[in-house]
Image (cartoon, helix red, strand yellow):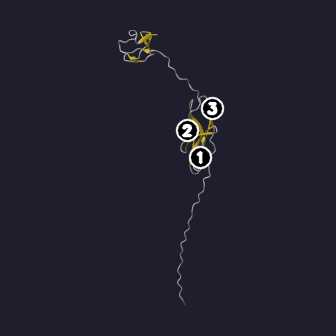
Amino acid sequence: MPQVNESPLSAEITVQTTSANIPDTSAPTAPSHLHAHTVSAASVSLMWSSSTDNVAVSSYDIYQGSDRIATVNGTVTSYEVTGLKSSSTYTFSIKAKDSAGNVSEASNVITVTTLESSPPVIEPDVPKAWAENTSYRIGDRVLYKEVIYICRQAHTSIYTWTPSEVLALWLPE
């Protein structure tokens, strides 16, 4: 009888797979808890809680009414709006974006009224007591021996140039 040599056949099969580029179509969650941290006559400091995304939040758009006024990095959760008018009311909202361009729903909308601007504080022109070794300018007012004097010529005072004695420098009011 003939002899048959049986040897196992071995074959290596390599399967190569490629990952399909699945486009990111998921928008980030809406930013939440938008609030005004500080308010002044000309600015509002906004803060909010961050959004989440299946990949990453790349930026936040800040809206004043329906106008986008700024864009900040996706790691930033605050923004100061400047150049506002005093005693004026504004509305703000935030939207998150991811790198694929997906945009979230808007955050809560807040309404903020800027503060009334205060008039500049004008110090009363109270004359200061005359003193030696002091620089005076034309128009400065001093009190010396219960009389108010106005400086007529810029100078630095010395002890013998008292307002009552040197009328070339001082004029009684």
**SS for dot 3:** strand
Place of residue 61 in the rendered image (x, y in percent of width and height, measured from the top left): 59, 42
Residue 134 vertical placement versus 2 (above, below):
above
Total marks drawn?
3
Q: Residue furthest bottom?
A: 1
Q: Amino acid at mark 1?
A: Lys
User: Circle 2: is it few (<14), some (14-19), or many (20+) Cα within 10 Å?
Assistant: some
Instruction: Look at mark 2 in the image and give the residue it sits on.
Output: 79
Q: Quadrant of residue 80?
A: top right
Instruction: Look at mark 1 in the image and give the residue it sits on.
Output: 97
Sequence order check, earlier mark of 3 and 2: 2
Spatial CA span between label 1 and label 3: 27 Å
User: Circle 1: is it few (<14), some (14-19), or many (20+) Cα within 10 Å?
Assistant: many
Place of residue 35 in the rendered image (x, y in percent of width and height, measured from the top left): 59, 37
Sequence order check, earlier mark of 2 and 1: 2
Q: Amino acid at mark 2?
A: Tyr
Spatial CA span between label 3 and label 2: 18 Å
Q: Amino acid at mark 3?
A: Thr
Place of residue 144 in the rendered image (x, y in percent of width and height, measured from the top left): 42, 11
**SS for dot 2:** strand
**Residue at 58 percent of width and 43 percent of height:** 60
